[in-house]
Amino acid sequence: MNKNRSTTIITAAVALLAVAAVVFAVIKVSQSERIRQEFEDEKEQTFIPSAELLVEMQDNAERLVAADYEIVKLFYTKGLDHEPEPYGNLPEDGYFFAVSDKYKTLDSIYELLFNTFTKETADAIKASDKTYADREGRLGISEKFAPNTGYDIDWTEPSYVITAEAEDKCTLGLTLKHAGEPLNITVGMTKQGGIWLLDELIYE
């Protein structure tokens, strides 16, 4: 009788151990599957650009930074020269005729905006613009425009670091200089309508 009981106990213990081993194996498999899935998800989220795409992003970053600086000068730090009104009067409509070989109409200014910034940013700058206006089919500049003569960011030797995020998206790490020290700026670049554009104005 005792022998049978001992055999039963041993059999039950072996069964429990077998069940525990199966449960442990299921847990290990489940953990391995989760780790594998997390690795695959992370792998899918990591965008690896081609060499050609990186060159394209770099070239457009240089173009866009130069255009951004042009806009900074036009709208904030320098503006444009203008023709004097007869007898030195102020213009009745509040705008002088601007003098520029490059920008002769209001559309030429806004073309620069929309070739530099995403539509959302360009629209916002255009909507708030009180510097320029159409004046009899020519470009007019406001008599109230006051250049920011204290602006002291040095754009002469910018450096770039491109981080590609997708075929049509990257982050631009831009380094300018302020008071002789590096000034680090981060801005997004987006490809819209086949053209690379800045997500926002760089002005600081």
Image (cartoon, rainbow, N blue to C red):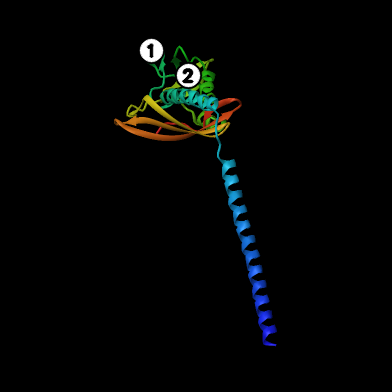
Name the residue type under label 2: Gly
Question: Closest to the observer: 12 or 175?
Answer: 12
Name the image quarter holding residue 160: top left
Q: Residues within 10 Å of mark 2 (few under 14, many from 20)?
A: many
Q: Quadrant of the C terminus?
A: top left
Provide the residue designation for mark 2: 140
Residue 36 location (% of width, % of height): 60, 49
Question: What's the mark number on residue 175?
Answer: none
Residue 6 location (% of width, % of height): 66, 82
x 47%, y 27%: residue:
130
Residue 131 location (% of width, % of height): 45, 25
Provide the residue designation for mark 1: 87
Q: Residue furthest bottom?
A: 1
Question: Closest to the observer: 170 or 52?
Answer: 52
Q: CA distance from mark 2 to mark 1?
A: 19 Å
Q: Quadrant of the N terminus?
A: bottom right
Residue 175 location (% of width, % of height): 39, 31
Name the residue type under label 1: Tyr
Q: Residue furthest left?
A: 180
